Image (spheres, helix red, strand yellow):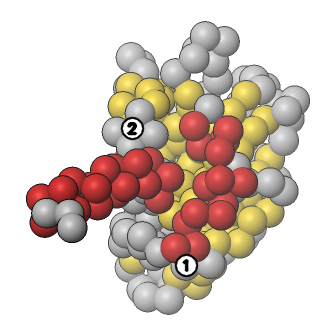
Amino acid sequence: MRSPSVSLALVSAVVSLALPFALPLHGHGPGVIDRDVVEVDDPTLSWVFPGHFDTGDEVFTLLLDFPDEGFAFPIEVLVPHQVGLEEHRPAIAIIAAGLPPPTEAQRAAVPGGIPDGLGVIVDDNSVDPRPVLFEGFMRRVYWTSGPLAVAVDRGVTEVRIWSPAGTAGKFAIGFGVEEDFGADSFPPILEHWNDFAY
């Protein structure tokens, strides 16, 4: 019969091995940007959505339907810290009711236009020097645009992602607040392991 300390050690070892699979990017739920428009099931949770610019001309859109007024969520763009991606800086536009009206420069910069009556916040990912993030669970290093906190109204918020310089390569969008460590995390992570682990 095993002693309690041996059993505890075994459980700890199993948990330690499982954590990198279950908790990418500090507990973010796993999604994937595998088409032009992706609807997010519950944007109040913490998420990471990896994607890839094949040509640099693509425009990706996340649709986040918030249930409450004034929901504040942090969002940032991540790029693997790898040779060849030094100039890869995807930009994001957060488009929703209640945000500041777009300037002429923002209207010109955001692909696809900004619908009348909606406001926008644009992060062009141009901060210099470029911040570096070490992600402890996957043990990977990323360049980050830096977290941007945005308060949005109830209803649909659109996050549009594009590559202003036309660069290709991997990226990820991390956003949200509440952590969810459910078993549903495993299949998407394993299926898209190369996207999460690069």
Question: Tag 1: residue type?
Answer: Asp
Q: Helix or strand or loop: what does disc 1 sit on? A: loop
Residue 86 lies, with reference to residue 76, above or below; the image says above
* Horizontal arrangement in the rendering, residue 72 relative to residue 92 (left or right): left
Distance CA(mark 1)–CA(mark 2) = 23 Å
Could you say which disc has been placed on residue 135 in the image? 2
In-front residue for pair 94/10: 10
* Horizontal arrangement in the rendering, residue 166 relative to residue 109 (left or right): right
* Horizontal arrangement in the rendering, residue 151 relative to residue 106 (left or right): left
Q: Residues within 10 Å of mark 2 (few under 14, many from 20)?
A: few
Viewer can see residue 43: no
Q: Residue at x 37, y 55 (%)?
A: 14
Q: Position of residue 132 (x, y in %)?
A: 38, 25
Q: Residues within 10 Å of mark 1 (few under 14, many from 20)?
A: few
Task: Name the residue beneath numbered marker 1.
Answer: 42
Q: Residue at x 13, y 63 (%)?
A: 3
Q: Residue at x 80, y 63 (%)?
A: 37
Q: Residue at x 29, y 61 (%)?
A: 11
Residue 127, quarter of the rendered image:
top left
